[in-house]
């Protein structure tokens, strides 16, 4: 059973004061939506999401997620969550890539040691993808970034970011361009400003919304799937307590020279391109409030 898609079996009841009563029922991998009183509809999405995270964190035990883990709404394969010091990788043995990776930047920082060399095979995986299995012309693109993880979690955590289970084949123009710009902003600007920054990122295999997730570009004997784009969803808490979100869909081709703001999308668009469902435990109204907004600029 996948550790994050199938969070728990049975039933859990969560009571939030006089305003909120929510019942999570998870059977297999199906989450029933929360019920709510008419009075509870006045709660802001931020209050709702914060309360949901507080409740779910006691059951998922995942320090790297703001709220509940992504679940499949069209993603065709299962994944296995590989837990590391500074991030979790939901690894898909069929596509030979992580379906998503989650990390959380918070707390004190430390001196970062020189970057390790090499990209070790993750022996926890069945496919055991090797660095040499990637095609020429593609970088070994970190999902959980090595510098940020080293800064917040130390040397051993940095070493784990080089595992192949944390990599995607990325074109240099993407990996060294707008993707790197956002990674840099996460630890230089956003984590110091907001103290807590949560990130979920991964591959996109579809060219348009709601297409079946079936990668057409596969390479080599192990059939490594090459994404057409990569997504990143960033969450932070503002000083006023409001939830802030940024969502990006960055294409593999022709990304060089482009700014991340050109690739801002809604979380809903990410869902439609990936077959993943974020915040599945929230009501549809609450999901709509969070997921349909598109930022117009990066945070200061």
Image (spheres, rainbow, N blue to C red):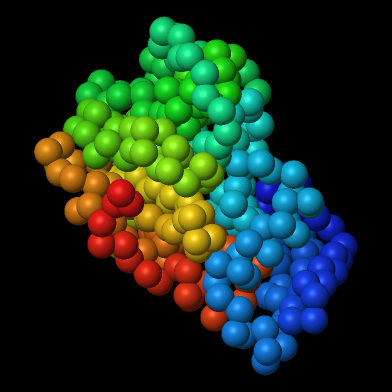
Above-or-below relation of 27 to 44: above
Horizontal side of 20 relative to 249 (left or right) equals right
Inspect this view and state whether residue 181 appears: yes
Above-or-below relation of 53 to 173: below
Residue sitting nearer the eye, 236 or 74: 236
Horizontal side of 253 relative to 170 (left or right) equals left
| Residue found farthest to the front | 239
For the image, the number of numbered tags is: 0
Horizontal side of 220 relative to 31 (left or right) equals left
Residue 115 drawn at (x, y percent): 41, 11
Quarter holding residue 185? top left
Q: Residue at x 25, y 21 (%)?
A: 136
Quarter holding residue 15? bottom right
Residue 150 drawn at (x, y percent): 50, 21
Residue sitting nearer the eye, 148 or 225: 148
| Residue found farthest to the left | 257
Above-or-below relation of 76 to 173: below
Above-or-below relation of 76 to 44: above
Q: Residue at x 43, y 51 (%)?
A: 233
Horizontal side of 126 relative to 193 (left or right) equals right
| Residue found farthest to the bottom | 38
Inspect this view and state whether residue 243 appears: no
Residue 239 drawn at (x, y percent): 49, 55
Residue 30 drawn at (x, y percent): 71, 65
Q: Residue at x 48, y 51 (%)?
A: 236
């Amino acid at each position: 059973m996948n550790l994050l898609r199938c969070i728990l079996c049975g039933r859990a009841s969560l009571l939030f004061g006089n305003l909120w009563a929510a019942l999570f029922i998870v059977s297999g991998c199906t989450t029933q939506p929360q019920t709510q009183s008419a009075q509870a509809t006045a709660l802001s999405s931020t209050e709702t999401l914060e309360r949901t995270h507080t409740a779910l964190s006691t059951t998922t035990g995942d320090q790297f997620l703001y709220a509940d883990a992504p679940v499949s709404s069209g993603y065709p394969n299962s994944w296995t969550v590989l837990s590391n010091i500074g991030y979790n990788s939901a690894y898909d043995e069929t596509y030979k890539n992580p379906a998503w990776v989650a990390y959380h930047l918070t707390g004190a920082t430390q001196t970062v040691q020189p970057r390790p060399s090499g990209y070790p095979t993750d022996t926890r995986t069945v496919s055991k993808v090797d660095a040499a299995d990637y095609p020429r012309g593609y970088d070994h693109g970190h999902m959980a970034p090595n510098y940020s993880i080293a800064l917040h979690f130390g040397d051993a955590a940095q070493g784990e970011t080089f595992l192949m289970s944390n990599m995607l084949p990325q074109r240099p123009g993407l990996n060294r361009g707008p993707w790197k710009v956002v990674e840099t902003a996460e630890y230089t600007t956003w984590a110091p400003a907001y103290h807590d920054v949560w990130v979920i990122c991964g591959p996109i295999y579809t060219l348009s919304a709601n297409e079946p997730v079936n990668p057409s570009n596969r390479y080599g004997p192990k059939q490594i799937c090459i994404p057409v784009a990569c997504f990143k969803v960033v969450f932070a808490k503002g000083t006023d307590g409001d939830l802030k979100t940024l969502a990006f869909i960055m294409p593999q081709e022709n990304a060089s020279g482009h700014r991340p703001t050109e690739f801002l999308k809604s979380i809903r668009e990410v869902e439609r391109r990936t077959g993943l469902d974020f915040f599945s435990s929230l009501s549809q109204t609450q999901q709509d409030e969070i997921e349909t907004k598109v930022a117009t600029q990066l945070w200061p």
